[in-house]
Amino acid sequence: MDTEERRAERRIDRQTLLKWAAAAGGAGVVAGPSGVADAMRALSAAESGRLQVLDWAGYGNDGGQAMFAQYVKAHPNNKPQFTYMTNEADALAKIHAGLKPDLFRPYVGWVKYFATSGLVQPWDTSKISNFKHLNPFMVKAGQYNGKQYGIPEDWGFDAILYRSDTVKPKAKSWGLLYDERYKGKIAWFDDPVENFTIAGLLFGFPDPWNQTDAQLAQSQKFLISKKHLVRTIWASETELDQQFASGDVWIALAWPNDWVQMKAKKLPVVYMHPAVKKQRPIAWVGMFMLLNGTPRPDLAHAYVDAWSSKASAKWLEDNYGYGHANTQARPSSSDLLRVLDLSNPKAVTLPNAYLDRDVPRRALYAKMWEEVKAS
Amino acid sequence: MGRGEGVLRRRFNLTTPSLLGLPLAWLGVFFLLPIAFVALYSFDVYTLYPGAHGFTLAGWRATFHEPIYLRLFWKSVKMSLTVSAIIVLLAYPLAYYLALSGTKRKYILLLLLIAPFLTSYLLRVLAWKVILGDQGVINTFLFWTGVRSPGHPLSQLLYSRFAVMLVLGYIWLPFVALPIFVSLESLDRSLLEAASDLGASRLQAFRRVTLPLSLPGIFAAFLFVFIPTLGEFVTPSLVGGASGYMYGNQIVDLFGTGFPDWETGSVLALFLLVVVAVLTIVFSRFLQPRQVASG
C-alpha cells in the first residue's frame, strides 16, 4: 500500500512527472540509435508541421508525456498536437466533421470497421523498430486482410470495481452492475455497445457482439428496467474517479487505472473479474491507426515507435495500471502484475477474458443505447 | 422646407440599410445558415457518411414514432417550467425590494446579486457537488445532528433531477431578477400615488397597478430562463447523473459521444428550435406593456 501511495503522490507532482518525461526521453535516445531510427529521422525531417494526434485524455500533454518523450526529443520541430476523443464513435464524428489527424487510437473492436471504412491505411512495420517486441497475439488482432492496420499499445480490461467495505457481491458476476441492493450507488459506462454486450453475457447469449433483434430487444428492456438503480453513467475516467472517491458511487464498470487510482487514495476496493459460467471481463487493446492521406506518415511511424518502446511501456504500467503490448516491460508492482496477468501473453483472450471484437450492427446497438439513456 | 425634408429622408433611407446590414448579415451567416444545414441533415440531404442519400422524412418519422424522445422532451419541459416558475417567484420580492424600497444602496445590492457571475460557471456548478454529495456539506451536517446515519445519506441531493433544478435555479436567479427590476424601476410612481389617493390599499395598489405593469418584466424573465434551460446540457451532465439526463444531453450525445447519428440529432435540435420559436412568438405579445395595460 505504501508504494502505491507514494506512486500516486509522485503522479500528482507535475515537476517529477516532467523530470520522468525527460528521463524517459533520454533513455530512448540512448537505447535507440539504431540504423532504422536514424534513417527514419532523416526521412521524416522532410515532413513539416506538428504531428496531429487524436487520442484519449491522459495520453497527450495532460500526463502522458513520458510515453512519447522519445519522439519529442528526436523531432522537436514536429511536436505532437492533441485533440481528445472520448471514444471511437466520437473520433469518427470528429474525422467526418473535418478534423484531419495523422493518427488516432481506436480499440481492437474497431479494427475491421476502420480498415474497411477507407479512412485509414496500413502501417509499414519495418519503420517501427520496437514492433518486434510487441505481443504477437495483439499484433495479429491489429491486422485485417493480412495488413497491419493497428499497432497495439495499451491494453486492459473492462471489469467491475467495487468498495469492499460496503458491497458484498453474491457471485463474481456482471450481475453486480444490476444489483437491487445497491440502488443509487452504481455507475455504468457510457459506451454505445458495451452495455448491450454485458447484458448479453449475463443472459448467456451465444454471441453478445452480434445479437439478434429479439436478443437486442431483451437486452434493451433489461437495461431500461435496471436504469433506476444507476446513479451516474460516466463518460470520462476523471468523472468516475471523482464519483468513486467521494463515495457517491460504490460499484462501477471500470478500467484497471481506476483501481490503481482508488487504491492510491487508500479506499478499500476490489477489481473483480466476472468468472461465473461463461462470464468473463472484456479485454481491450489500443490500436494506433494511420489516417489515409496524412502528410506526415514518417513522423507518425516515429511517434508510434516511441509509444512502443520498453521505457514507455513500463511507465504506462507503473503509472496508469494498464498493460502494454511490449512484452519486455514489467511493472514495479506485483499486485498489478497479478491483476493484469501480465506474465500471460494471452491474458486478453479466453479462458481469461473476451477480447473486444467487431460489432456488425454497431449503429443499431448505439441507437438502442441512446434510447436507454433517454428512457 | 420641402426640399430639405427630402434630403433628410434620402439620407435616412441610405443609413438604415447600411446600419442594419452588418447585424442582418451576421444573423444570416451565423444563425440562419447553420440552422439550414441542420435542417438538411435532418432530411438526410446531407449526411455524415458517404453514400447514396436524398430528401426523406424518415428521420422525423422514426424519431417521433417511438415516444421515448418525446417523453424525454416532456420531462425537460417540466423541469424547466418548474425551475423558471420557482425562481420568478423567488426573484420578484427581491427585485421589488431593490426597485421600490427607495434604499440608496440598491445598486450595490444589485451588484452583489450579480457578483457570482465574476467567477466561472463551471466552478460554481462544481462547488454544488461539494455541498450536495453523499459525503458533502449537507449530508455531513445531517450525520452530525443525527438526523441521518452515516450509512444512509440523502443521496437524492446529487446526481438527480433535484440537483439539476437546484443548480439551474441558482445559476439563473440573477437573470430573472434583472428584467423584473428594470420593469419595476421604470414604473411611474405617480400611478401608485394616484391609486392611494383614490383609496386603494397597498395590496390593492400592488394587485391593480404594480403587478400588471411589471408583467412584461415577469414574462421576459420567465423566457430568459425557460428557453436556455430547456436546451441545457452542461449542468445535467455535471450534476444530473442518470436520472437528471435532459433533452439537450440527448442532442449532444447523438452528435458527439455516441455512435454519430446526426440525422436524429438534427431532428431533435430542430424540434426544440420550433417549440422555442413558437413560445417566443406567443409570449412576445405579453412583452408590450401597453397591450398588457389596456388588455
Image: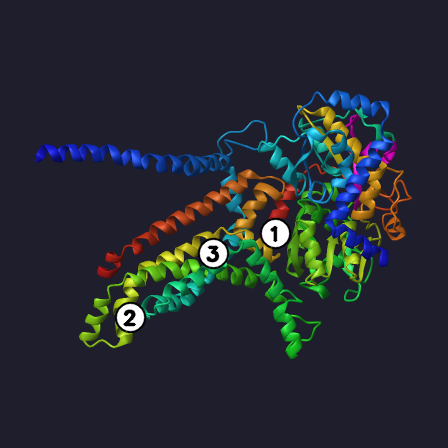
Residue A330 percent across, percent down from the top left? 89, 43
User: Observer-nearest residue: A207 or A324?
Assistant: A324
Marks 2 and 1: same chain? no
Q: Which residues are magenta?
A: A133-157
Pointer 3 indicates a residue of which chain? Answer: B
User: Observer-nearest residue: B231 or A64?
Assistant: A64
Q: Nearer the viewer, mark 3 or mark 2?
A: 2
Quick check: is A150 in the magenta stretch?
A: yes
User: Local crowd at mark 2 within 10 Å, few (<14), some, or many (≥20)?
Assistant: few
Q: Residue tagged by mark 3? A: B77
Residue B19 percent across, percent down from the top left? 30, 36
In this rendering, the count of numbered labels is: 3
Q: Is residue B186 left or right of residue A243?
A: left
Q: Amino acid at mark 2?
A: Arg
Residue B10 percent across, percent down from the top left? 19, 32
Marks 3 and 2: same chain? yes
Q: Residue at coordinates 43% horizontally, 60% vertically from top-left?
A: B174
- Asked whether disc 3 touches disc 1, contact meaning CB atoms under 8 Å apart, the reply is no
Quadrant containing the C terminus of chain A is: bottom right
